[in-house]
Amino acid sequence: MNDLIKKDLLHIWHPCSQMKDYEELKPIVIEKAKGIYLYDVEGKSYADVVSSWWCNLLGHCNDRINSAVKSQIDKLEHVIFANFSNIPTINLSARLAAYVPKGLNKFFFTDNGSSAIEAGMKMSFQYHYQTGNPKKRKFMALTDAYHGETIGALSASGVDLYSKIYNPMLMDIVRVEAPDCYRCKWGNCRNECNVECFENVEKEFKKWGEEISAFIVEPIVQAAAGMRIYPSLYLKKLRDICTQYNVHLIADEIATGFGRTGKMFACEHAGISPDIMCISKGLTGGYMPMAIAITTDEIYNAFYADYNEGKAFMHSHTYCGNPLAASAALEVLNILEDDDIINKSLENSIYFNKIINEYLSDLNYVGEIRSIGLINAIELVKDKENKTGFDSNLRIGYEIYKEALKRGVLLRPLGNVMYFNPPLTITKDEMESVVSKSIDSIKTILE
Ligand SMILES: *Cc1c(COP(=O)(O)O)cnc(C)c1O
C-alpha cells in the first residue's frame, strides 16, 4: 500500500464516512487538478462532476483565481474583522450588493455554510426579541431539508441520515412536509399545478405563526434531499405567508447560489427577496471557506443602538472576512461577468439535459430525470410504475459510485439519486464523456 494512504488511514477520520468502508475502497489521494479533472498521486484522472461537494464553480486551479489569490497573499493574509477591515472584503461586499435580491444590503461574514445558517437564525431570533416580539422563538423548515451539521443548522435540517441520532441534542423545529413533485400526492406534474401542497405550510402557520421567528428554506432545489426541484410558485407563496405572519424568510442559497440553477440566485426564479440569505460554496469558486449571512437594513437597524442597551450582534468567527477568500470571491465575480459564464452554462445545460434524457430515460430503473441549470438528477427506482425505490441496504448509489470511480468519474449519489452538478465551465465533450461513463457504471450495477 502506498505510504500516503497508510498514513491517511492511520491518522485521518474522513467526513461523512463509515471508516470501515475504507478497508475496501482506499482514500484517493489527489495531487493536482485542472478544470473538471482531479489527478491522483498515481496519475489517474477523475472528472469532478459533483464540483467537490458543489463548491468548485469554475474548474479547479483556474488561472485567474490562482493569480488573484497569489497577489493577495503577499499583501495581507488575514486580519481581525472587529473594528478592522480589509480591501478585498470591502470590495466584495459592495460588488455582491448589486447581485443579491433587492433589499439585501448588510453582509455578515462567517467561514462555512453551517455557521452562516447559525448566524442567520440568531440574527432573526434577536431581531424579534429586540422589536417587542420575544415569543417568536421557534423555527420552521421543510422535511428532508439540509442546512448544515452544526447543532442549530442540523436542527433545521430534516435528513434523518445526518440528524436522527442527535435528536435529543437538537432544537425543536416546526416541520412542514416538503413538496415532492415526483411523488405528488395530488397527482400533479411539476410546474403545471397550483402548488396544492402549500396547504401543509398554511396549516402549520395557522397553528404556530405567532411563535415563529423564521422559516429556513433551500430555494427551488432541496439539494441533499436528492436534488428535489419544486415550483417557483411555492417559494412565492412562502414569501407572502412569512410577510403576513411577521416571520423572516431565510433563504439557504449555499448550494443553489452562483448560477447553479441557471440564475445567479435561485430566489430569482420566484422574483422574491428573503429577509436573510446565506451563501457559501460557489462564493469563492470553491477555493476557500467563506460564507455570508446577508440581510436587510431593517434587521440591521434593530441591533443599532447605544452600546449599553446591549443590542449588538455578539457573534464572531476567527476567520470572518478573510481577505484571501475575498480575493478569490472577487475574481469569481470578475470571471462570471467577463466570460458571461451563467448564460453560457445555461445554453450548455440544454445539451447536457438532452443527452442525459436520450441515453437514460428509457431504462426501466430510471424513475425520474429532473434538471435545472447544469444540475441533473436521476432517481433510480426498483419499480418505475409504482415509483418504489431500492432498499437502502443494497447501497445502490454507493455501488455505482465505486463503479464510476474505476472509469474515472467522481459521482457521489445521494442515496438512490445519482446526479451531476459540474463546474459551470464544463464543455460539451466533457459532458458526453462523463454521461457515457456514468451510464456504463449504472448498467454494470443494475443489469
Ligand atoms: C453545504 C450546505 C450547507 C452547509 O455548508 P457547510 O459549509 O458544509 O457547513 C448548508 N446548506 C446547504 C443547502 C448546503 O448545500
Image: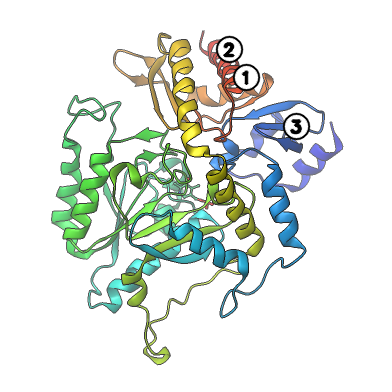
Across and down, in percent, residue 199 comes to 15, 42
Badge 1 marks a residue whose secondary structure is helix
Asked if marks 1 and 2 touch (Cβ < 8 Å), the reply is yes
Extreme residue toward the front, this view: 338
181 sits left or right of 277 in the view? left
Mark nearer the N terminus (1 vs 2): 1
Q: Quadrant of residue 98?
A: bottom left
Which comes before the other along the chain, label 3 or label 1?
3
The answer to whether residue 243 is left or right of residue 340 is left
Judging by the rendered image, the residue that carries numbered circle 2 is 440
Under tag 2, what secondary structure?
helix
How many circles with numbers are drawn on the protein? 3
Question: Residue 403 has which mark?
Answer: 1
Q: For the point 25% across and 68% down, which residue is it?
A: 136
The image quarter containing residue 172 is: bottom left
Instruction: Assign a secondary structure to mark 3.
Output: strand
As rendered, which of 161 and 405 lies closer to the eye?
405
Q: On the image, numbered disc 3 is attached to which residue? A: 39
